[in-house]
Image (tube, grey):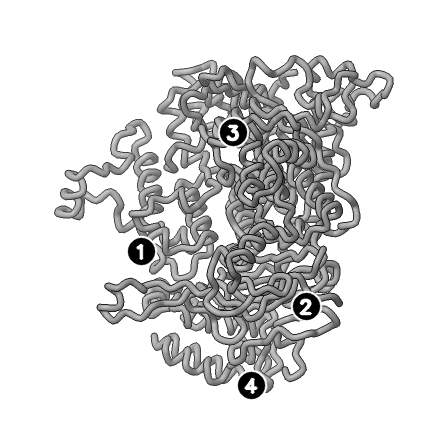
Amino acid sequence: MVLVPRESDSADLIRVRDLTTRFYTEEGQINAVESINFTIQKGEIFGIVGESGSGKSVAALSLIDLIEEPGRIVGGEIWYRNPDLAEMVADATPDAVDGAYVDILQLSEGGRHALRGSTFSMIFQDPMSSFNPSVTVGEQIAEAVEVQRRASANPRSTRARTEDFSLVSFLLSSALPSRQFVTPDSKDRAIELLEQVGIPDPAKRAEEYPYEYSGGMLQRAMIAQALAGEPEILIADEPTTALDVTIQSQILQLLSELQDETGLSIVLISHNLGVISRICDRVGVMYAGELIEKGDLSDIHQSSVHPYTQGLLDSIPDFEHPESSLQPIPGNVPSLLDSEMGDGCYFADRCPKAMTTCREKPPEFTVDGDDDHTVQCYLAREAYDPAKALEDNIDSEEPDATASTMNREQLEHSPVEFDNE
Amino acid sequence: MSEPLVHVSDLKKHYYEQDTLLDRALGNDPVAVRAVDGVSFDIHEGETLGLVGESGCGKSTLGEALVNLETPTTGDVTFDNLPVYDLDEDQEREFRRRVQVVFQDPYSSLNPRMTVGETIREPMALHDMGTKAERKETARELLEQVGLDADHTERYPHEFSGGQRQRIGIARALGVEPDFIVLDEPVSALDVSVQAQILTLLNDLQAEYDLTYLLITHDLSIVRRISDRIAVMYLGKFAEIGPTEEIFENPQHPYTEGLLENVPRANVEEQYRDIQIIAGDVPSPRDPPSGCRFRTRCPEIIQPAAFDLNQDHWRAIVDLKTQLENGSLSTDWLVSRAANKRDDQSLEQQLREHFELPSTLGNDTADAVLNRVLSALTDERPDDALGILETEFESLCERESPALEETEPNRCTACHLYQEDSD
């Protein structure tokens, strides 16, 4: 099942292979992300869609190596194409290099840290809580610019890359302007970045505090901050969920313009298939920690194979054809506790087309010989046969409340508690 | 048509800032936040009125004022011909039984220390409904009715998922046999697949118990599913009110049109759909724009009668004016622009490029005015530029606030484009 990286296919910027992330909590082991495979091409927008608790945020955080205790990336490879980096690390860690690709999970912690901001950058759902309320927006962006500037000027040293907020440093920097962390140059760059993301009168707005910004403006500012290190990949985790629909359109347009102008690759995570449909080129659907189906936007919309993907599409009110009735998926997202997860397909107990074969975990199939459209479902290989239907299919309305909610909460809460750099 | 169940007339709710004793002693004038600023409408028995608007438009405040959880500044609400803000004790008790609310956040609207059964039985006990045994039985029946297991009465809220908790909240509201339920964002905290389940449940319950709903939401795709009529709210006022299908098929107010157009569709053609993006932010309710409140963002803002400019060019002029008004185009900005300007481009050209103004508007008078404005700006006199714009390019939409008037039977729109006396 592991695909060998193809040398000819040089458009892949990132190749993720069997990435697995688990959380070790008091209740037990939680398989938040289970052996997912995907690629990100240069200059594309890759969407990850799924319900809450499906592991989409954890997958993104694993990519940028921001998983915190009690979570850990326990397996897999993340191959990043960068010939310069490959040459640099080839001597120290030969295993981590394959041609122009580097497996960033095998790099040292310092090496991975150095990729944040300059290669990967991230924006979050709630702009209001992602900024420091007591520092001006301009200064926070300038700080990010400064961190990246120092990092690229002196890649080996990790000291002096973060601002020290002690009383001593405050007094010193007040008394001696040369000791200030941000320089006039980085402040000017911050204003340029604010202008790039469409903030009117950026020089004045840079002097304002986050509370003086509206939600949409603050999301723009967060994008500006993420662009400070001129990253190759921007990970946007539900960037418009906290915003109104008119503002959502503005932000999506901004992301797609930035992608056009700078050739950035974007990973867009959303629960809203409409948002994904507006700007993504390819989509992956996540369910219970697995990437169950991925393909072009049209593969997902028009020729999806997995019953969950179809269920997700059917449970969205169709704006153009309201008369078509909603088909909710019965039941709830399953528990991700390792002890409670069966061996078979995780969707089988909610699946209208579950068969006896589904008691065994389906591997990843390609659909109709199209290498870009893959699905983890036996329906790609054989048509549904009612004679083989799974008999003990759990009644849809039977709530399995305890486990699923508790795990979902842990999953939602644990990754959110880090600081926005 | 029959008497409306709920009748709202000219309801206003203003909150005051800077209104402490200290502020008074210092002579600070209180600042009014006009959350709800004069709305009138009816809700008829058995119907669902969808109240739609973006965050901060006052829709939740309106919902709370309707059920007397907020005392309005002015205005009246009658419920079944009784004045809601002027009830005696018995009437008040009866009103509190007949009107229920289902809240947005199923995680914080249930008491974590009460079992589900206790939660559902409490309102019934407060209203002296049935004996203890009967209430227990009713709670079990209600749980089944909302799609949960009757044996779950002894469980606590944390044992349930978000969708299940929302079902418990609905069961609690149904226990006292209400006539009217205010649903304040009932599904926005839930996943899409669960949203569909709850909406279906609400629909079924309405049919069974002949309930009247006020559905408050920011999500247009939800209102379309279960509302009979829709009211669209913007900055404390109604932009438009009318039957759901008519509003979706043929939105009249440019704001409604923009809202509908901006909802992302989940289909393959979405990337190629031509969307008119509504620029800017919702203005502050502390200082709402003069005239029509949507005019600062409206793509169809009316031109002065003397001109017939390209609408995009006109919109660009209005944007320039709005930025001058709210101070985001300041002298500092002009100075920094002038300092950084490229050699091959004059400041005037930069301004035209920045505001997407064409080199000519195709109308000599308008061009002359615009040139005066731009030369005032290049001389760093933004106040003069604003003065010229205000006298020469004044839109009807800035001057007069459009009233909510009937444009078609059962349909009202507050927009000058649809009013008889507009030019």
Mark 1 or mark 2, which is nearer to you? 2
Please give the residue where the numbered disc 3 appears in the rendered image.
Answer: B158
> Which residue is at the front of the view, A107 or A411?
A411
Identify residue type, mark 2: Gln
Q: Amino acid at mark 4?
A: Asp
Amino acid type indicated by mark 3 = His
| Residue lying furthest left | A175
Instruction: Describe the element under mark 4 as helix, strand or loop.
Output: helix
How far is mark 1 from mark 4, CA to CA? 41 Å
Q: Earlier in the sequence, mark 4 or mark 3?
A: 3
**Spatial CA span between label 2 and label 3:** 45 Å
User: Residue lying farthest front?
Assistant: B131
Q: Amino acid at mark 1?
A: Glu
As drawn, the label of residue B364 is: 4
Mark 3, secondary structure of its residue: helix
Neighbourhood count class around disc 4 (C-alpha, 10 Å): few under 14, some 14–19, many 20 upward: few
Please name whichever residue, B292 or A12, is drawn nearer the observer in this view of the structure.
Answer: B292
Closer to us: B1 or B51: B1
Image coordinates for residue A421, horizontal then vertical, percent: 37, 37
Q: Is residue A217 above or below residue B161?
A: below
**Chain under callout 4:** B
Residue under numbered circle 2: B252
Disc 4 from disc 3: Cα separation? 70 Å
Specify the subunit that label 3 lies on: B
Distance from disc 1 to disc 2, alpha carbons, whole Å, reads: 40 Å
**Vertical order, B300 against A31 (above or below):** below
Measured Cα–Cα span from mark 3 to mark 1: 44 Å
Q: Which residue is mark 1?
A: A207
The residues bearing labels 4 and 2 have C-alpha atoms spaced at a distance of: 33 Å
Q: Nearer the viewer, mark 2 or mark 3?
A: 3
